Image (cartoon, rainbow, N blue to C red):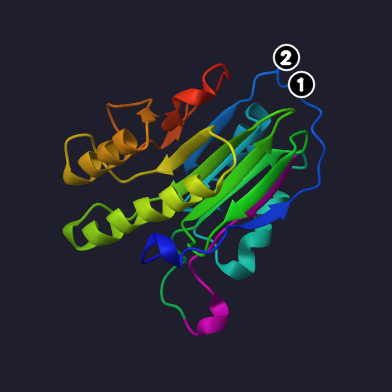
Amino acid sequence: MEGLSATKKAETINTQQQSTMAAKNEELSVVTYNCRGLTASLHDIEQLCAMYHIIFLQETWLAKQTLDKLTDISDNHFACGTAEVDYTKGITSGRPYGGTAILWNKKLNANIFMNQDQSIIGLEVCLDSSSLNFINVYMPYCCDSNYDEYINYFSKISTLCDETDSPNVFIVGFFNACPNDNFGKLLSQFCLEHELKITDKSFFQLILSPMLVILMEHAAGWTM
């Protein structure tokens, strides 16, 4: 996205699944995992599905034509993902790259939302009187040539946040930033401007974490 005005209303995919989880009585467990290839990490992801309600994946390395592999991972989870590579556009060199995905327990009443970017995908979890909105991102690699692109991603994320109807927004994923480098400073500034709280300030490049990387204070009261 080149600017906020270029983003269309996020496409929504409704699972039409009614929630059987009582928001007041049952905890919601989530995890984010940079799997660096779905095939190589399949066993680990299957284990995560046995432990968590929602699993956010980055770097699945799938093509658009192989995204259906996500639905074979767990019988208890719905799945949806994005892919950078499209085999219909001609010959590609090397393995697929990038890609994000979300797997969520079928007990949840949840909707996928996304924009045109293949490194961002969102999930809205509907509650009785409110909702939780998760945005799963894979940020550009931290090098000087990607600096402007990195900044543009914050515009994309900001737009998705603005389009949600709930104040309960969580941003999770792989941020390719350390606290003291230029990219970490950009991330910290973005959080400050949008009243977001960073839950792990020691290292932003989380490979596997049972907590959310960034969360809005409004979501306090839910155990993650």
> Where residue 175 appears, x then y in whole percent?
35, 44
> Where residue 22 appears, x then y in whole percent?
76, 21
Mark 2 and mark 1 residues within 8 Å of each other at the beta carbon? yes
> Where residue 97 appears, x then y in whole percent?
44, 62
Q: Is residue 35 visible?
A: no
Amino acid bearing label 2: Asn
Q: Is residue 10 visible?
A: yes
Circle 2 crowding by C-alpha within 10 Å: few under 14, some 14–19, many from 20? few
Residue for point 33% across, 36% down: 191
Q: Quadrant of the C terminus?
A: top right
Amino acid bearing label 1: Ala
Q: In this picture, is 212 found above or below 38? A: above
For residue 165, side relative to residue 173 (left or right): right
Q: For mark 2, what is the residue?
A: 25
- Please say whether residue 87 is one of the residues in the magenta stretch: yes
Please tell me whether mark 1 sits on a helix, a strand or a loop.
loop
Residue for point 72% across, 46% down: 78
Looking at the rendering, the stretch of residues picked out in magenta corresponds to 77-91
Whole-number angstrom distance, CA of label 2 to CA of label 1: 5 Å
Q: For mark 1, what is the residue?
A: 22
Q: In this picture, is 89 found above or below 99? A: below
Quadrant of the image occupied by residue 200: top left
Circle 1 crowding by C-alpha within 10 Å: few under 14, some 14–19, many from 20? few
Please tell me whether mark 2 sits on a helix, a strand or a loop.
loop
Quadrant of the image occupied by residue 179: top left
